[in-house]
C-alpha cells in the first residue's frame, strides 16, 4: 500500500550508480512512499537511468545545479503532509517513515524528527548521532526525544507545511550546512525539532565527493548564518573563534574570502534572533565545540 503521509525527496548530481541503489532501497520499503528526484544537471546519464528504471518516481530536471534549492523545487510537487529527505547515498530503514509519521501526527508543533544514522558498509553509528542524542537543549515533555536546534537533511522527516512556512532552503547558501538557517527561522516561529532514536537512516558515503570543496562551503555558510542571525557580539565572538580554531590553510582562506565577498547581501538580509533563541544557539555552539562531527577538516 502506498504511504499516504510521506513523500521522499532526493537531490542528486552525477552519482548515477549510487542514486539507483538508493531508489532501489526506497522502492523496497513497506511504506512504498512517493518519491521525487531533482537531478541537478547531471552529465552522467542519471536522469535517463531514473526515467528508465524508476518510472514511478517524479523526476525533475531544472537544467542547472540548484544545490539544496533542488529540494525546494521538489517540495512544490509534494502533496503529502510530510516530506522525508535523504541524499543520493543514503536511504531509510523499513518502518521508519511510518513511525515518523506517527510521531508527527500527534505533535502539531513538531516541525521535524531526525533519525539515527548508521554508516555502511560497517554498520557503525555516525559520530553526529552522539551529538543529537546528547543535545543540551531543553524542550516540552511531549517531544519524542531530545530537542534539537537544527536537523540533517539526509536523515529527517519534516512537516511539509513547516518547510513551506520557513521558506525552504535559502538560495544564497546553495549547499553545505544549509539546514541551520531554515531551522533557526522555524524555531523563531515556535516550531520544535527532535531526535528520534527509533528512526534509522543508512548512509554509505559517496566516493564521488570533494571533501575540501565541501569544507569551504560549510565554513562559508557557517559564517553567513552567524552574520545573518546572531546578535552583534555573539556573531563577533563566533567569527573570532572560527578564525582561531579552523585549519590555517588555503581552503579556510577561500572560505573566509567567499564569506566576506557575500557581506553586502548578508547585511541586507541580516535579522538577528531574539534573546531567548540566542540563548539556545549559544548553548548549542558551546556543545558543538567538542563534537567530533564538527571539525572543519578535509
Image (tube, rainbow, N blue to C red):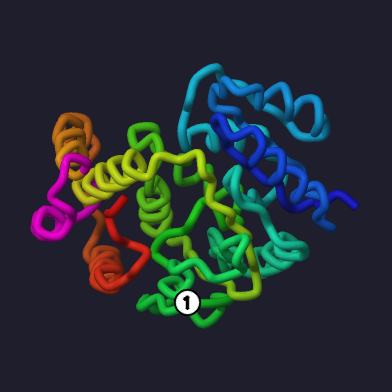
- Along the line of sight, which residue is nearer the eye, 218 or 43? 43
What is the magenta range?
A: 228-251
Q: Main secondary structure of the magenta part?
A: helix
**Residue at screen point 38% across, 49% down:** 177
Q: Is residue 63 left or right of residue 32?
A: left
Q: In this view, does 215 lie to the left or right of 27?
A: left
Residue 219: percent from the left, percent from the top?
A: 26, 47
Element at label 1: helix
Q: In this view, does 264 lie to the left or right of 46?
A: left
- Along the line of sight, which residue is nearer the eye, 269 or 3? 3
- Along the line of sight, which residue is nearer the eye, 292 or 136? 292
- Residue that badge 1 annotates: 133
Question: With respect to residue 246, does 16 lie above or below?
Answer: above
The image quarter containing residue 259 is top left
- Along the line of sight, which residue is nearer the eye, 173 or 189? 173
The image quarter containing residue 104 is bottom right
Farthest residue, direction right: 1
**Residue at screen point 44% across, 77% down:** 139
**Residue at screen point 49% across, 64% down:** 193
Is residue 266 visible in the rendered image? The answer is yes
Farthest residue, direction top: 63
Residue 1: percent from the left, percent from the top?
A: 90, 52
Question: With respect to residue 180, does 101 lie above or below?
Answer: below
Whether the magenta-drawn stretch holds residue 293 is answered as no
Question: With respect to residue 268, does 220 lie above or below?
Answer: below
**Residue at screen point 67% across, 24% down:** 47
Residue 270: percent from the left, percent from the top?
A: 21, 42
Amino acid at each position: 500500500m502506498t504511504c499516504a503521509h510521506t513523500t521522499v525527496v532526493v537531490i542528486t548530481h552525477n552519482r548515477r550508480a549510487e542514486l539507483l541503489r538508493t531508489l532501489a532501497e526506497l522502492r523496497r520499503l513497506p511504506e512504498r512512499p512517493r518519491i521525487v528526484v531533482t537531478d541537478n544537471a547531471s552529465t552522467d546519464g542519471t536522469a535517463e537511468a531514473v526515467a528508465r528504471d524508476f518510472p514511478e518516481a517524479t523526476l525533475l530536471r531544472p537544467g542547472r545545479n540548484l544545490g539544496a534549492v533542488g529540494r525546494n523545487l521538489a517540495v512544490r510537487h509534494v502533496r503529502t503532509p510530510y516530506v522525508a529527505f535523504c541524499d543520493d547515498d543514503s536511504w531509510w530503514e523499513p518502518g521508519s517513515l511510518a513511525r515518523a509519521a506517527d510521531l508527527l501526527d500527534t505533535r502539531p508543533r513538531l516541525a521535524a524528527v531526525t533519525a539515527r544514522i548508521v554508516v555502511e558498509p560497517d554498520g557503525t553509528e555516525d559520530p553526529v548521532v552522539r551529538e543529537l542524542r546528547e543535545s543540551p537543549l531543553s524542550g516540552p515533555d511531549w517531544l519524542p526525544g531530545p530537542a534539537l536546534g537544527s536537523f540533517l537533511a539526509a536523515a529527517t522527516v519534516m512537516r511539509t507545511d513547516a518547510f513551506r512556512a520557513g521558506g525552504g532552503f535559502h538560495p544564497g547558501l546553495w549547499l553545505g550546512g544549509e539546514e541551520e538557517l531554515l531551522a533557526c527561522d522555524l524555531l523563531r516561529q515556535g516550531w520544535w525539532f527532535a531526535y528520534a532514536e527509533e528512526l534509522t537512516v543508512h548512509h554509505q558515503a559517496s566516493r564521488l565527493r570533494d571533501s575540501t570543496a565541501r569544507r569551504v562551503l560549510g565554513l562559508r555558510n557557517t559564517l553567513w548564518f552567524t552574520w545573518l542571525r546572531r546578535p552583534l557580539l555573539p556573531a563577533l565572538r563566533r567569527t573570532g573563534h572560527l578564525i582561531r580554531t579552523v585549519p590555517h590553510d588555503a581552503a579556510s582562506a577561500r572560505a573566509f574570502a567567499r564569506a566576506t565577498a557575500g557581506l553586502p547581501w548578508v547585511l541586507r538580509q541580516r535579522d538577528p534572533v531574539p534573546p531567548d533563541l540566542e540563548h539556545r544557539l549559544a548553548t548549542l555552539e558551546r556543545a558543538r565545540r567538542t563534537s567530533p562531527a564538527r571539525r572543519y577538516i578535509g
